[in-house]
Amino acid sequence: MAVAENAPIFARSSPQPLAVLFERRFGYRLQMDSVTRNLAEGALFTDLYQLTMVQLYWQEGIALTPARFEHSFRTNPDYGTHQAGYCINAGMADLIDWMNAFRFSQGDLEYLATLGNPEAPTFGTEFLGWLGSLEDAFGELTITAIPEGRAVFPGVPLTVVEGPLAMCQLLETALLNHLCYPTLIATKASRIADSARGRPTFEFGLRRGPQFGATAGVRAAIIGGATSTSFVGAAQVLGVSPAGTHAHAMVQAIDALGGDELEAFRAYAKVYPEETLLLVDTFSTLKSGVPNAITVFDELKEQGHTPVGIRLDSGDLAHLAVRSSALLTAAGFPDVSIVLSGGLAEFPIWQILTQIEQEAPEYGVDADQLIDRLIFGVGTKLLTSEGAPSLDGVYKLVAVQQDGEWKPAYKISENPAKRVIPGHKQVVRIYDQSGRAVADVLAVDEEDISTKDLKLRNPKQASVSRVVGQEEISEIEPLLETVWNGSPVPGYDDIDAARARRLEDLDRLHPGVRRLVRPHVHHVSLTEDLWNLLPIE
Amino acid sequence: MAVAENAPIFARSSPQPLAVLFERRFGYRLQMDSVTRNLAEGALFTDLYQLTMVQLYWQEGIALTPARFEHSFRTNPDYGTHQAGYCINAGMADLIDWMNAFRFSQGDLEYLATLGNPEAPTFGTEFLGWLGSLEDAFGELTITAIPEGRAVFPGVPLTVVEGPLAMCQLLETALLNHLCYPTLIATKASRIADSARGRPTFEFGLRRGPQFGATAGVRAAIIGGATSTSFVGAAQVLGVSPAGTHAHAMVQAIDALGGDELEAFRAYAKVYPEETLLLVDTFSTLKSGVPNAITVFDELKEQGHTPVGIRLDSGDLAHLAVRSSALLTAAGFPDVSIVLSGGLAEFPIWQILTQIEQEAPEYGVDADQLIDRLIFGVGTKLLTSEGAPSLDGVYKLVAVQQDGEWKPAYKISENPAKRVIPGHKQVVRIYDQSGRAVADVLAVDEEDISTKDLKLRNPKQASVSRVVGQEEISEIEPLLETVWNGSPVPGYDDIDAARARRLEDLDRLHPGVRRLVRPHVHHVSLTEDLWNLLPIE
């Protein structure tokens, strides 16, 4: 068994005195468990083989050989019965924050020195000394990337890393980790936002989200179109207003202490007269929850306050929304919000809206008016990307430099889908004369694609090609922008800009690309020149 | 739109000088982005409504009323075509680390003071002062829990929290967050370990895992039976030896620089003569990869070294394993390992082993001998629990104290599955005379269950009950142990003990509970006395 006998050396040391200094300066307490977390999440937030490869490069004298790696994903998330037509790119800001802090500490190096057979340690002393001397390991790297928030497609390089081979390799695991999960969540959030027809979607997923990965997940959800989050810490860091309602426990507690639901609601209204949003399903939504809420809303109104709304968290949500809406409207509250939550995602929301349109007339409710008062609370299924919990991102060497000349790097593999397209590339999106995006195109770096007609190849099917004449094209838009040039390019973490890019991109794509089911395929093509570089199989 | 105009205040401050102090003392550099992370992952690692509820309790004078909450999950993970028969409990150690560090900092309080309408802020100054004065907020809490690593079942209280109502509420989000995801991953790891028939399973999932949640995921995977991890930082923190092979990029780079696969393998063997594990699928596994590996193994052998093995990462893994094994054995290497990776989880592993048993004889390979040399690299599908990416954990108020007497707390809900079983409970596992676990039983706290025959009720079906006589029972085992008593009970983070508990428990369950498909149902029952406390529907 590979589990060692000894407990880790640093894991339980207490940083108390420094925490106090820290708090004085930064206004918050350094959490003690961040001592452990820093060990795991610093330079050693990587796979062992990245470090063994770097030692090999160093010993072979090629650690500083210029190299180029590309990051892309292979397929749109497949949720089982349906597959996304696009992804929303996200995660770069967190990756850059991580890179900015990157450095092998003395503790990291001491740990690495313990690995392997004591007589033949995995890492040599000289090599570890070299690692420790890298004050600014990523200072020679350049990263271009498709900006956060943009719609992106399988097989297109989303991130291109250029610099010393060893440093490109050191980055691999953290790069994939920081980009795959957020892109997956931004994509889910975008589908959910679309299904909600412009109504707000609140992110409520922290409790069942992936532990401390939830912060990155919430950021991605906001980029992908979520309106807010219940996670207070993430809201603070992201500059978003946090959202919340109330807990079942509050109604239960007041009930168990001899009160009742109405008393609980009154207590809530007393403390939050301008923010009264009542959870009405603790006992019976229609028999007690909504009538009690109406009583309290009446009282608030008399006191000059404006009640905010109710929340439904169980049962047949669409039916209960129709019935509650009828009661609220009849009681003189046609505008208070109805928050729906409980297992929601793009299809449940679609189903709820469809059902509301069918059922509302039966109860004399105007379906459109009801839909206009809805807010969707989306939790677990958003932060875990229910149905497709991972994105198949890869990071591949495509070229290395020798004597000043770039050499393409090949990988053939048993599986054609895992083939690497070698060499330097241009990555552009082309738009037709109506301004609609018609394809993403990969071309050879030196190729002039702005004057000639483009023969476009399907990268996976040799027999499929088409020609797009320049007269058909209104714009050839380069997609990659520099985000790291030895250090971060300012603006890399602008979440509002990322949100805006998503909306712009979705407007310029073929509308069918956004469909929840059987989306239109946005083409990703190679120019003939790039196609000719592919290894023959 | 709820996204604020202004960037967060503290997010980009640089902790440089303190980081240096920190490194001097703790031997590692404090990551700069932990400044941001601490904001999100400290006391504000919670949902807004927990804080609004606490203010309400405080204003109503019931913040310190003794309360009892129970955490459980509702259903075993359902992977679509199949459902788990049990879960492996995990995550408590990280929760306790978080609790140990819990405190509202000045920065947290200043942030909370900004929320809501400036004229009617959500949180009052006095209340925030009270929050800030909680030097040891969880000092009055007691937590009992089923220990990490144990097999657990739906509807059974896994964690019971008792103490002041406000503090129980403050804990909810972080408790669920820290326990749901790890339990899900430990469960997946356990199924994978079972499917691998005792062969090692290496965790390789960091790159596509949920950002910084991966550390908790790896810990859970190790508890659930994974043998090792490629994630160096997590290995260090957990006291596990990290595992790794080599990168495609290394072969590609040496090839692009004018060398070839054989040269790349030789470079690897030169640097790691005692740890030579070669990735053979960069160009063609059988035509070049394995023959080149054999050449290098021969050279290593001549030099007195023992080659470790090969890794197959694409193609028809079972077929390639059989063919590679034949080649390796014929070349005099019958014992070197064959690591398989690429999209593996419990069913792919089951399929691979089945296929090997079918195909091996065709190539003159002994299937059992081949299986004995296999190691499984399990990545993405383990750390994201492919098929069932979330566990439906809940945390419910079950009782509050008034005038020294406990009052049961009810919740009825539109959905019977969301019903709360109120009151104080005993939680035990009963074993039959052969020593096999036959059921988990929930009973009223004061009930004597060790002398009378037990009438056991199915909690979801009123018509289903059975009687178990005391003479049938060999042991009644209380499952809950104290893990927090104002502060951590030592031993809470013993990962080796957790691993051992899993093996013991799985041995004592009905063997069918472990089946990957259509598992035997381990019963969870209520005693008649507890049943009688349920609200009538």
Image: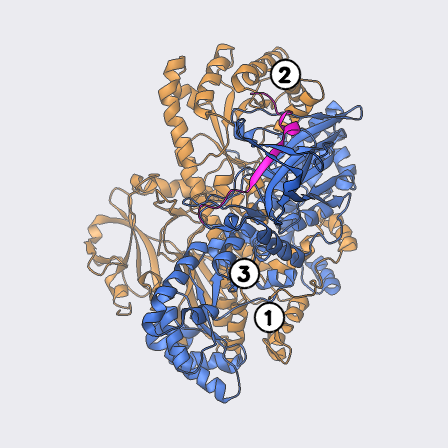
Chain colours: A orange, B blue
Which residue is under mark 2? A262
Q: Are marks 1 and 2 on the same chain?
A: yes
Q: Are marks 3 and 2 in contact (CB under 8 Å)?
A: no
The foreground one among B16 and B82 is: B82
Residue situated in front as seen by the camera: B425 or A110: B425
Across and down, in percent, residue A136 comes to 58, 67
Query: Which contiguous range is marked in magenta?
Result: B517-537
Q: Amino acid at mark 2?
A: Leu
Taking the spot 54% from the left edge, 39% from the top edge, the residue there is: B392
Circle on res. A134: 1
**Mark 3 touching mark 1, by CB under 8 A?**
no
Q: Chain of mark 1?
A: A
Q: Nearer the viewer, mark 3 or mark 2?
A: 2
- Kindly identify which residue carries mark 3: A487
On screen, residue A512 above or below B328: above
* Label 1 packing within 10 angstroms: few (<14), some (14-19), many (20+): few
User: Which mark is first along the chain, 2 or 1?
Assistant: 1
Neighbour tally class for label 2: few under 14, some 14-19, many 20 plus, Cα within 10 Å: many
User: For the residues marked 3 and 2, what is the alpha-carbon distance in whole angstroms?
Assistant: 58 Å
Q: Nearer the viewer, mark 3 or mark 1?
A: 1
For disc 3, the chain is: A
Label 3 secondary element: loop
Amino acid at the residue labelled 1: Leu
Q: Whole-percent x and y of residue B503?
A: 60, 56
Label 3 sits on what residue type?
Answer: Ser
Check the image and report above or below for A478 versus B120: below
Give residue A300's quadrant in the image.
top right
